[in-house]
Image (cartoon, rainbow, N blue to C red):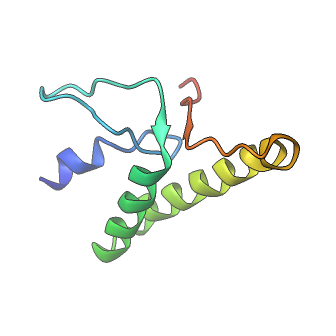
Amino acid sequence: MLGRLLQYQHPSGGCFNYVGDGPQVEEQPTLGTLNTSFFGHLMLALDRREEAIRAGDWLRRWVAANAAHMKQEGVLYSNMTPPAR
């Protein structure tokens, strides 16, 4: 089961909201902040430090990417497009 959960994390550290029902991951067009934060907390509880740090780093980049939008437009985007592999 842990292997299946780990499939939700993109190499960038963010997490998909859905990866499909089959054995192959169906990458989605965006990575979500809510799933990423839950995933990071779960990885901490499971003592999976590397995955937790990647999730935290992704969340930090998400906050930084939103800074200008929040300041100029008062808009907070909750998803990000995954970077190219």
Give the left or right position of residue 5, taking residue 83 as reference.
left
Q: Quadrant of residue 82?
A: top right
Residue 45's place in the image compared with 40, above or below, is: below
Q: Position of residue 50 (x, y in %)?
A: 45, 62
Q: Position of residue 56 (x, y in %)?
A: 55, 61
Viewer-proximal residue among 46 and 78: 78
Name the outermost residue toward the front.
74
Q: Residue at x 36, y 25 (%)?
A: 27
Q: Residue at x 26, y 32 (%)?
A: 19
Viewer-proximal residue among 40 and 69: 69
Q: Position of residue 1 (x, y in %)?
A: 11, 53
Q: Residue at x 56, y 29 (%)?
A: 81
Label total for image: 0
Give the left or right position of residue 81, taking residue 16 as reference.
right
Residue 47's place in the image compared with 40, above or below, is: below
Residue 42's place in the image compared with 19, above or below, is: below
Viewer-proximal residue among 73 and 84: 73
Q: Quadrant of residue 8?
A: top left
Q: Residue at x 27, y 72 (%)?
A: 46
